[in-house]
Image: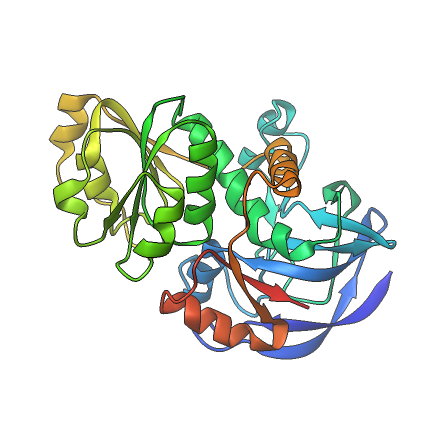
Amino acid sequence: METISRAAVLKQFATDFSIDKVKVMATQKEVLVKVTASGICGRDLVIWKGGFRNLSTPLILGHENYGEMEGKPVGVLGNISCGQCEYCRKGEPNLCEKATLLGEGRMGGYADVIAVPRINVFNLPDREYKKYAAAVCPVATAIHASKLANVKQGSRVLVTGAGGGVGIHTLQLLRRSGAEVIAQTSEEKAKIVQRWADKVITSEQFAREAKGVDAVIELVGAPTLNESIRAVSKKGVVVVVGNVTGEPLTITRPALLVMRELEIIGSASYTPAEVLTAVNMIHEGTVEPVYREYSLEDINSAYRDLREKRVIGRAILVH
């Protein structure tokens, strides 16, 4: 199958996207999905900056895509796994040794139509595509990270970058799990974020007031990692989900790791089962999607607003 689609193409890193017509081709095991809404992930922003040295332009980004296939509402798993390596066989395709992510190894969903393996398409319970584009990836990410952090009823958990797309939905998930939630965010976002947190710490207060937590969901990376390490109690854990600047993660006081027996764990996105759990939570209203929408033509405005930290929650593209 073959069609022509409108797409936002990144022709050079750290420059504006251009809206072009592109050819979309589906192989025998693939299907065409009409994209209605796409989420803009923090990973996409790092790619836009040129933070992934293995990638080269031109690129059509976007691994969080929702729309229709054969007239039915569907979502698309952005991680195309091999299904055969040891991790896929163990039910951990997020660690697949041969994985390809939409928008990186192949065309992503900043387009009106995409071609994807049929096995990567899943049904949605309704046609409210915007809410899924806004919240499924963040909620699934939070589910996976909270498991790694061993979050339980009464756990004290700090979330850095809490006003962003993953952060604001992670707060909600943690509150639902019975954890005491401490949010770190900017002064500008603090009043909004406090709705979903037991305590809010601004960036300026971080060093003074963040301490005694059982776990940190580290969404920012290099700029906040060392303060997160300082905030964790003995036997605590820091789960590193993202590194928004792409800078090296440097530990300035390794003695804290030794003397407190701390763990630092990486969190590799999520599994398909966690995606379906997230879909059900959003459908049932357990989590409230928080987002700002932009048309595909306004993608450059969306990226400017994200870079300038003017977006509360997730930015999404509506096609």
- Horizontal side of residue 269 vs 23, given as left or right: left
- Horizontal side of residue 215 vs 26, given as left or right: left
Residue 4: image x %, image y %? 79, 72
Q: Is residue 113 above or below residue 137?
A: below
Q: Is residue 243 visible?
A: no
Q: Residue at x 17, y 54 (%)?
A: 204
The quarter of the rendered structure image containing the C terminus is: bottom right
The quarter of the rendered structure image containing the N terminus is: bottom right
Q: Residue at x 45, y 76 (%)?
A: 15
Q: Nearer the viewer, residue 92 or 40?
A: 40
Q: Residue at x 51, y 45 (%)?
A: 138
Q: Residue at x 12, y 29 (%)?
A: 255
Q: Please, which colouring scheme is shown?
A: rainbow
Number of marks in picture: 0
Q: Is residue 267 visible?
A: yes
Residue 145 image-quadrant placement: top left
Residue 123 image-quadrant placement: top right
Residue 297 image-quadrant placement: bottom right
Residue 55: image x %, image y %? 50, 59
Q: Is residue 20 above or below residue 268?
A: below
Residue 206: image x %, image y %? 19, 47
Residue 281: image x %, image y %? 61, 37
